[in-house]
C-alpha cells in the first residue's frame, strides 16, 4: 500500500476572504496588547490636526505596533515594516496596512510624551487590576550597560584630540604656503589646495567643538568631585575631633581641574561614553531600572551616560511612577552606596529605607554563615550612616529582604537582553535613548502582565 500525503497546492484559491483572527490563537499576546493600548489615553500623541497631506496612521495602531514588535524582539523600523507583510500577528494588528519604515521611525522619535504617558498608564492598568499592592512597595534598583548606536572607534581622547588639532593647524599653514608658492609641486590628480584646506578647517572646527564639550563636562565633574572632597575632609575632621587623634593616611587629594588626557568624545554620538561592559570597554549608555519585587514589573526607569551607578540612586527613585504609590524599601548593591545618596533618599526618615550592600558579596556561603545567629545590637545614637547600613544588612530581616534584589532586577535585565534581544539603542543622544528605554520598559511590562495572566476588560 502506497504512503499517503497531505495534498499541498500552492495555487489553490481562497473561496472567501480570509479572517486573520482565524489564524491566531484566541489567547495570543497581540490581542492583549491591542486591548491594553485601546484602554490608554492617547491624547498626547503628535498628529496632523490640519488634515492636510496624506491620511495618517492612527496613534493606537502605531503604538501597539511598536510595543508588540519590541516585546517580541524586533526593534528596527525596516524589520517592523517587513513584519507587516510576513508576520500574521503583526499583519492582523496593522489591519493589513503597511506603514513604511520612515513613518514608524518618525512616530517613535517624535512621541516622547506619549511613550512616557503610556508607561505610567500601563502601571495604572495593572494597579486597577490588583496585580500588585499600591503603596509601601519594595523595589530593587540596578543598572545595565547597553551599547550606543556608535562605534568606540569613533571616539577620541582629549590628549589625542589636542595632537590632532595641532596637526590640522600645521597642515593648513603648510597648504596656504604651498598655494602662495608658484613653483610648488602640484597635488595628485583630482585634489586641489582650496578643497584640502576646507576639509582640514572643517575637521578643526569639529575638534574644537569636541574640546569645548569636554571642558564643559570637566567643569561639571569638578563640582561633583569638590563636594565629595569636602565631605571626606569633614568626615576626617569629625573623626579627629571625636577621637582626639590625628587620622592615619594621607589627606584626600583635591580634584583636578580641566579635562584629563583620557577623557573621551565620540563624534557619532557625543553623549554616549566608553564604559566597561563585562570584560571589555564599549561605547555605551547606563540604563537604570527600579523593579517591584513581587511582580518583577519595571516601575521606574531612566538612562544615564555616567559610567557607574554612584549618582544614580536618587534620580532612579525620582523616576518611579506615581501609579504604584510610595516606596517603602529600596534594595541596591554596593555600587550605589554613598552617605550623601542614602541621606538624600531617606530624608531623615520621611523617605524610603535603603538597604545597600557595603561591600561586594562573595558567592556561596560558609558553614558559619549557614548557622543561626541572633541579630547584632543596634548601633549607638550618633552612629554614622555606614554603621547603620551595615547593621541593617546583618539582621535576619535585612538579609531576607536584600536577598530579593538579585532575584528580581537582574532577571529583568536578563529577559530584556537575552529573550527580547535588546542590547543596543537604535536612537542617538541621551534624550532619545531615554525615549527608547521607556518604550522597551513598557513593552516588557505588558509582556510580563500578559504572562501573569492579567486580562483587559473591554467595553
Image: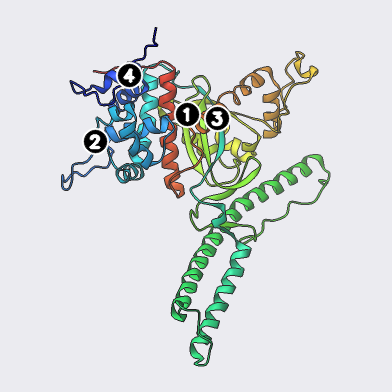
Circle 2 residue: 58
Quarter residue 414 falls in: top right
Dot 1 lies on which element?
strand
Q: Looking at the image, is mark 3 or mark 4 nearer the viewer?
A: 3
Q: In this view, does 429 lie above or below 38?
A: below
Colouring of the image: rainbow
- Horizontally, is 264 left or right of 84 in the view? right
**Residue 174 image position (x, y, % from top left):** 55, 82
Local secondary structure at mark 3? helix
The circle on residue 298 is 1
Residue farthest along the top direction in this orientation: 1
Is tag 4's residue or tag 1's residue first in the polypeptide sequence?
1
State the mark number for residue 456.
4
Q: Distance between the residues labelled 3 and 4?
A: 27 Å
Disc 2 element = loop
Query: Whole-Å distance between the Cαs marked 1 and 2?
Result: 27 Å
Name the element at disc 4: loop
Residue at 64 percent of width and 58 percent of height: 262
First of labels 3, 1 by sequence position: 1
Mark 4 to mark 1 CA distance (whole Å): 19 Å
Mark toward the viewer: 3 or 1: 3
Residue 229: give x, y in percent of width and height: 67, 50
Residue located at (34% from left, 15% from top): 6
User: Please, which residue is most extreme toward the bottom here?
Assistant: 183
Amino acid at each position: 500500500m502506497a504512503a499517503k500525503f497531505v495534498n499541498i497546492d500552492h495555487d489553490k484559491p481562497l473561496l472567501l476572504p480570509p479572517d486573520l483572527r482565524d489564524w491566531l490563537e484566541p489567547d495570543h499576546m497581540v490581542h492583549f496588547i491591542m486591548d491594553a493600548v485601546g484602554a490608554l489615553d492617547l491624547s498626547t500623541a503628535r498628529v496632523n490636526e490640519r488634515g492636510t497631506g496624506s491620511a495618517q496612521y492612527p496613534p493606537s495602531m502605531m503604538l501597539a505596533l511598536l510595543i508588540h514588535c519590541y516585546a517580541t524582539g524586533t526593534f528596527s523600523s525596516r524589520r517592523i515594516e517587513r513584519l507587516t507583510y510576513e508576520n500574521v500577528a503583526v499583519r492582523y494588528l496593522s489591519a493589513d496596512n503597511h506603514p513604511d519604515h520612515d513613518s514608524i521611525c518618525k512616530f517613535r522619535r517624535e512621541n516622547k510624551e506619549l511613550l512616557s504617558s503610556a508607561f505610567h498608564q500601563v502601571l495604572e492598568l495593572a494597579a486597577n487590576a490588583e496585580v500588585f499592592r499600591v503603596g509601601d512597595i519594595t523595589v530593587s534598583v540596578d543598572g545595565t550597560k547597553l551599547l550606543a548606536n556608535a562605534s568606540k572607534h569613533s571616539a577620541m581622547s582629549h590628549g589625542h584630540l589636542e595632537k590632532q588639532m595641532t596637526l590640522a593647524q600645521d597642515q593648513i599653514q603648510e597648504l596656504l604656503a604651498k598655494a602662495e608658492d608658484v613653483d610648488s609641486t602640484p597635488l595628485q590628480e583630482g585634489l586641489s589646495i582650496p578643497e584640502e584646506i576646507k576639509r582640514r578647517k572643517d575637521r578643526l572646527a569639529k575638534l574644537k567643538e569636541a574640546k569645548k564639550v569636554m571642558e564643559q563636562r570637566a567643569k561639571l565633574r569638578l563640582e561633583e568631585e569638590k563636594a565629595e572632597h569636602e565631605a571626606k575632609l569633614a568626615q576626617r575632621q569629625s573623626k579627629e575631633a571625636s577621637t582626639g587623634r590625628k587620622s592615619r593616611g594621607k589627606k584626600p587629594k583635591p580634584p583636578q581641574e580641566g579635562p584629563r588626557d583620557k577623557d573621551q568624545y565620540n563624534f557619532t554620538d557625543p553623549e554616549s561614553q566608553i564604559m566597561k561592559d563585562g570584560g571589555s570597554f564599549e561605547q555605551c549608555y547606563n540604563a537604570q531600572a527600579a523593579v517591584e519585587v513581587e511582580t518583577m514589573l519595571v516601575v521606574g526607569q531612566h538612562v544615564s551616560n555616567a559610567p557607574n551607578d554612584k549618582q544614580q540612586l536618587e534620580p532612579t527613585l525620582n523616576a518611579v511612577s506615581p501609579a504604584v504609590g510610595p516606596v517603602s524599601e529600596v534594595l541596591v548593591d554596593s555600587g550605589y552606596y554613598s552617605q550623601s545618596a542614602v541621606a538624600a533618599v531617606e530624608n531623615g526618615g520621611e523617605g524610603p529605607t535603603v538597604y545597600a550592600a557595603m561591600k561586594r558579596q562573595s558567592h556561596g556561603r560558609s558553614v558559619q554563615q549557614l548557622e543561626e545567629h541572633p541579630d547584632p545590637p543596634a548601633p549607638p545614637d550618633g552612629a554614622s550612616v555606614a554603621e547603620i547600613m551595615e547593621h541593617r544588612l546583618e539582621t535576619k530581616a535585612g538579609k531576607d529582604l536584600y536577598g530579593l534584589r538579585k532575584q528580581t532586577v537582574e532577571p529583568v535585565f536578563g529577559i530584556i537582553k537575552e529573550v527580547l534581544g535588546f542590547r543596543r539603542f537604535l536612537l542617538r543622544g541621551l534624550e532619545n535613548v531615554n525615549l527608547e528605554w521607556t518604550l522597551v520598559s513598557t513593552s516588557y511590562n505588558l509582556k510580563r502582565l500578559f504572562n501573569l495572566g492579567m486580562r483587559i476588560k473591554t467595553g
